[in-house]
Image (cartoon, rainbow, N blue to C red):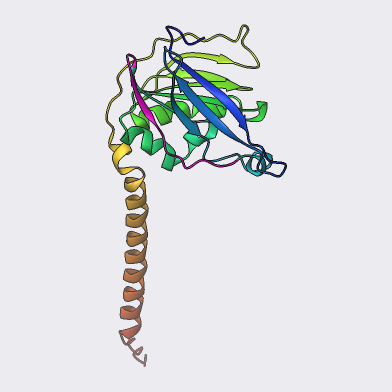
Amino acid sequence: MCQGENLDMGLAVVLPSQQPPFGRDESVLIDPSGKIVSIYQKAHPVAGEENLRLVAGNGQIPVVASPYGRLATVVCQDRDFLDIISRVGQANADILLVPGGDWREIDPYHSQLATFQAIEMGSSLVTQVDGGLSVAVDYEGNVLASTDFYSTDPQLMVAYVPMQGVHTIYATIGDLFAWLSIAGLVVLIGFAIARRRKAGKAEAAVPSEEPHPVS
């Protein structure tokens, strides 16, 4: 299957156990010779049934050099977590491949987040989603192609994706600016409260003048 092509294949690997967790959710990258060049294990199983039956991975993202740029892969909702998505940008991945599975209630909203994530990482992002919106997005957030599980027939997506990404400040500092903004707001609120209290004490310290009797 892999002769002459780079394939990103999502595999469910079952562990020999009669007790939960029973398996692990992995994305496997195979090169044109058929050799497995990277395996990523889902680090954030969905809360509920999946969290009970899957072994969580360590979140380490392998990045593989290829004729099409530096390729990285994660699984499904792992791309929603800052600790995962920031590593993709820090590793200077050019293209992030994301196999996943959604459901109607979060379609197409979950996949639409890919536009922001691609901009944050500075990497193009291709996500193939069972039960949702599959989309290819470049590092500027432009949607290059899409197909929806519930409304598109046939389920086929072809896109020309940039082979080189860009470095972004967000990949380096993450949400630091947002946290600094929150800290600055707290300081300003505290300053305003302290100033108001000081002004109130000053007014209370000023003696009031006695009214003059009128004859």
Q: Position of residue 182 (x, y in %)?
A: 37, 53
| In the depicted structure, whether residue 133 falls above or below residue 153 | below
Residue at image position (68%, 44%) is 20
Residue at image position (30%, 30%) is 92
Residue at image position (64%, 22%) is 131
| In the depicted structure, whether residue 48 falls above or below residue 145 | below
Residue at image position (47%, 40%) is 81
In depth, the one of 25 and 121 nearer the eye is: 25
Q: Position of residue 82 (x, y in %)?
A: 43, 41
In depth, the one of 193 and 5 nearer the eye is: 5
Residue 188 shown left or right of residue 77 in the figure: left
| In the depicted structure, whether residue 182 falls above or below residue 50 | below
Residue 70, picture quadrant: top left
| In the depicted structure, whether residue 135 falls above or below residue 75 | above
- Queried whether the magenta region covers residue 56, the answer comes back as yes
Q: Which residues make up the magenta segment?
A: 55-68
Residue 56 shown left or right of residue 39 in the figure: right
In depth, the one of 73 and 120 nearer the eye is: 73
The C terminus is located in which quarter? Answer: bottom left
In depth, the one of 207 and 33 nearer the eye is: 33
Q: Position of residue 169 (x, y in %)?
A: 28, 37
Residue 168, picture quadrant: top left
Q: Position of residue 90 (x, y in %)?
A: 31, 36
- Queried whether the magenta region covers residue 76, the answer comes back as no
The kind of secondary structure the magenta stretch mainly shows is loop
